[in-house]
Structures are given as structure tokens and as C-alpha cells.
Image: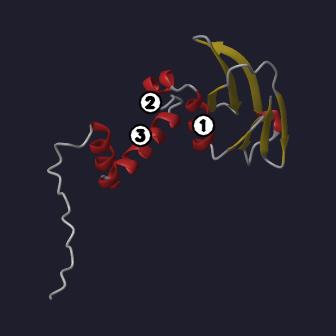
Amino acid sequence: MEEWEEVEIQTVSDGFDASPTELHAAFEISGDHLAEVRDRHTMMLVTSGELPENHMAEIAPERRLNWMIDELNGRRHSDGLSLPLHGADDSMIDLSKGEIEGSSILKLRVGENFVRNLPLPAGVDSIKASFKDGVLNLRW
């Protein structure tokens, strides 16, 4: 008697049964150039003092601060953040806390030409700032 080995048949999809989320994810994975375009777009917006993706910032406001920290080569901590400001001294740095369109903002000014508005997380009442070895440390 002969022995037979079963061969598995793989179902091949024509793509019409995929969900829009799956198709979008596949497109993003295959489009290597899209990450570079997004990065350059974000860099230009931050350089001009604007927040990237304003509509996304309205949907997920916690992302706004992370974008600014990343663009300034800083670090986020559970109770604040650190920003490298090498080449500056404490007399050149001005910090002020205010509100813009209902959001708490920390305005950072270094010298005459560098101004950034850093959105603060909800519930931040007081900020402690220190400047040591060219790094501005902010704690709340």
C-alpha cells in the first residue's frame, strides 16, 4: 500500500477581504519615503515656531509636548523635562507661564531670536526651573 502525505492548500487573498486599517498599515510599511517626508515637515513647522499637525494636536494634545521635546533634543521625565541649551547662559534664558486658547503654555526664550511655546500637561500648577552645565531642567 502506498503512503500519501497531505498537502496543505493556502488560501490566497485578492485584497478585497482586507479591512481599511490593514490596507493602510501595509501601505505605510511599504512607503519608506513617507517617514522622511513626515520628519522634514515636522522639522520645518517646529523651526518656524508652529506645532506640527495642528489637527492631531487637538485630537491628542499630549503629543504636542513630546514633539517639541524631540525637536529640541530634550528628554521627558515623569515629573518634567530637560532641554540642552549649550552655549547659552542663565541671563539669556527667559521662562514665562501663560495660557493660549485654554491650554497652559510655557514660553521659552533664549536670546532674541529663539522662542518656543511648550504646551504643558494638564494639571501642572507650578514649575521649578534650574540651569546647570548647559541643560535647562524643568520639574512640576
- Labels 1 and 2 touching (C-beta < 8 A): no
Which residue is situated farthest in the front direction here? 1
- Give the image location of residue 7, x and y in percent: 19, 72
Q: Which residue is mark 1?
A: 66
Q: Which residue is mark 3?
A: 41
Labels 3 and 2: the sequence-earlier one? 3
Viewport quadrant of the C terminus? top right
Q: Which amino acid does the dot numbered 3 rest on? A: His
**Badge 3 density bin: few <14, some 14–19, many ≥20, Cα 10 Å:** some
Mark 3 falls on what kind of element?
A: helix
| Foreground: disc 1 or disc 3 | 1
Residue sitting nearer the eye, 2 or 122? 2
Asked if residue 113 is positioned above or below residue 85 in the image, the reply reads above
Query: For the point 40% across and 49% down, which residue is it?
Result: 35
Mark 1 falls on what kind of element?
A: helix
- Give the image location of residue 78, x and y in percent: 75, 38
Mark 2 falls on what kind of element?
A: loop
Please state if 130 lies on the left or on the right of 120 as rendered. right
Q: Which amino acid does the dot numbered 1 rest on? A: Asn
Query: For the point 15% across and 88% down, which residue is it?
Result: 1
The answer for how far apart the CA atoms under marks 1 and 2 are is 13 Å
Asked if residue 25 is positioned above or below residue 9 in the image, the reply reads above
Q: Which residue is mark 2?
A: 53
The answer for how far apart the CA atoms under marks 1 and 3 are is 16 Å
